[in-house]
Amino acid sequence: MEVYEVEDELIVTVEIAGVTEDDLNVEIDESVLRIAGTRPFPEGSRRRVFHQTGIPYGDFEAEVFLPFAVALDDVEAAYENGMLHVHLPRARPTRIVPRGIDVPADAQQEE
């Protein structure tokens, strides 16, 4: 997995070969991107004796902490050739403008 930030978004790239889009679940829960799925075990009834293995099968899950607020409506994910690319655009900052509050004259006298 690679997670990196560019000027206006966070990009997450995950290598998940051998998984179909139907076997993937990508969701955002507050400040965490969660990627989960299942890589099916190889089919076949023949007995296998592995000499080397490095491909994990079965369920998997990965979580990425989001370092800034994300514009959820603009998130894009694409799965192609075994690579999942998730683009998480930075939410526009909200601006808080201080406003004065009028205090009635009679409220000042009660103090």
Image: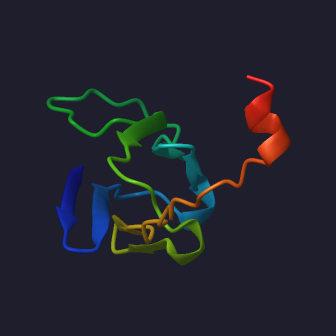
Residue nearest the viewer, comparing 99 with 105: 105
Residue 62, given in percent of the width and then of the height, sits at 40, 38
At 59% across and 58% down in the image, what residue appears?
100
Q: Based on the displayed image, in which of its 4 quarters is residue 69 positioned?
A: bottom left
Residue 95 appears in the rendering: yes
Residue that extends furthest to the front in the rendered view of this protein:
109
Q: Based on the displayed image, in which of its 4 quarters is residue 46 positioned?
A: top left
91 relative to 82 in the view: left or right = right
Residue that extends furthest to the right in the rendered view of this protein:
106
36 relative to 11 in the view: left or right = right
At 28% across and 57% down in the image, what residue appears?
15
Residue 43 appears in the rendering: no
Vertical placement of residue 49 versus 46, above or below: above
Residue 87, given in percent of the width and then of the height, sits at 38, 70
Residue nearest the viewer, comparing 94 with 45: 94
Residue that extends furthest to the left in the rendered view of this protein:
52
At 73% across and 22% down in the image, what residue appears?
111
Residue nearest the viewer, comparing 55 with 75: 75
Q: Based on the displayed image, in which of its 4 quarters is residue 99 positioned?
A: bottom right
Residue 105, given in percent of the width and then of the height, sits at 78, 46
The type of colouring in the image is rainbow
41 relative to 105 in the view: left or right = left
Residue 65, given in percent of the width and then of the height, sits at 37, 40
At 35% across and 55% down in the image, what residue appears?
16
The number of discs equals 0
